[in-house]
Image (tube, rainbow, N blue to C red):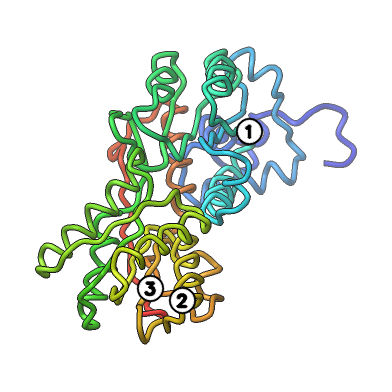
Amino acid sequence: MAGRGTRPTLEEVAALAGVGRGTVSRVINGSPRVSPRARDAVLAAIDELGYVPNRAARTLVTRRTETVALVIAESELRLFDEPFFAGMIRGVSAALAETGLQLLLALARSPAEYARLEGYLTAQHVDGVLLTSLHAADPLPGRLEASGVPTVLGGRPPGVEPVSYVDVDNRSGARLAVEHLVGRGRRRIATIAGPQDMGVGIDRLTGYRTALAEAGLPELVAYGDFSEASGIAAAEELLALDPELDAIFAADDPMALGAVRVLRRHGRDVPGDVAVVGFEDSPSAALSDPPLSTVHQSAEEMGREMTRLLLARINGEPLAEPVVILPPHLVVRASS
């Protein structure tokens, strides 16, 4: 506020907003335990008074760094090539926007990178960690929790019992895709499965196999790593194994789009000869030629839910549902 000689205080913000000091503190710390009306009143008072939290003092008192880390266990190439990660980052950023917390993005793939990152994250440099794209029985979540660092995972990791995670119902989504293809009269349905050291890869393959078993149809499986290049290689393998295949379900959109390229190169019409369905509903799916049928999942919603759970854990609030499973739905377009 213009003309003030001293910094506005937390008590002045509370008085102007007509709420208690604790409510103002919860709004500033990003707690979800505040009504929208009270939150709006506090934010308006902060804006009117020009209140700026004393970060240094708060850090000494609360032992908080006001920083949350998002750790993606992938390379830079995967991060920038796959739209899923961009969506998750948008969701996390949106959820942190009104909390005043800073977002630290970290990538880790090699053992050496993991060791350095673990040392940093467990040394009180961050208040909590969001961790996604885990492979195999990754020890990092358990080590973070053991060090007192609240951690929320994106995706169900194999071989790990996390305190809290957010995922899509991947098995159900894969079943939707395959049941759609069966309903369209397809009988030689192949899949390009994701990595089997990741929960998402395992679950989508399980959903595919369950739907085929219920329909009494044979399996035809090749594997990729969620990249378009791996989808191209897997589609070539599938055509060599069964030149008469009439449908492909790919465990993500980039692999599905790679399969479409291969089919066209071999003179196969999509969907006339071979129908194709992906998983993700990425922006490129609707813009492809033909537009790609795909199972919708919202990476942004996953990011928001992960952040909501992490903020609650940082603030010591009990979680009624520490695991959130988001429902998928099928988006049918011209490719199937």
Q: Residues within 10 Å of mark 3 (few under 14, many from 20)?
A: many
- Residue found at the very far front of the displayed protein: 240
Among the 4 quarters of the image, the one containing residue 216: bottom left
Circle on res. 276:
3
Among the 4 quarters of the image, the one containing residue 327: bottom left
> Is mark 2 in CB contact (under 8 Å) with mark 3?
no
Choose the circle earlier in sequence order: 3 or 1: 1
Choose the circle earlier in sequence order: 2 or 3: 2
Q: Nearer the viewer, residue 223 or 129?
A: 223
Residue type at mark 3 is: Val
Mark 2 → mark 1, Cα distance in angstroms: 45 Å
| In-image side of 312 versus 208 (left or right) | right
Q: Kindly report which numbered mark, 3 or 1, lies closer to the viewer in this rendering.
A: 3
Q: Residues within 10 Å of mark 1 (few under 14, many from 20)?
A: few
Q: Which residue is mark 1?
A: 104
Circle on res. 266:
2
Instruction: Decide: is 120 above or below 216.
Output: above
Mark 3 → mark 1, Cα distance in angstroms: 37 Å
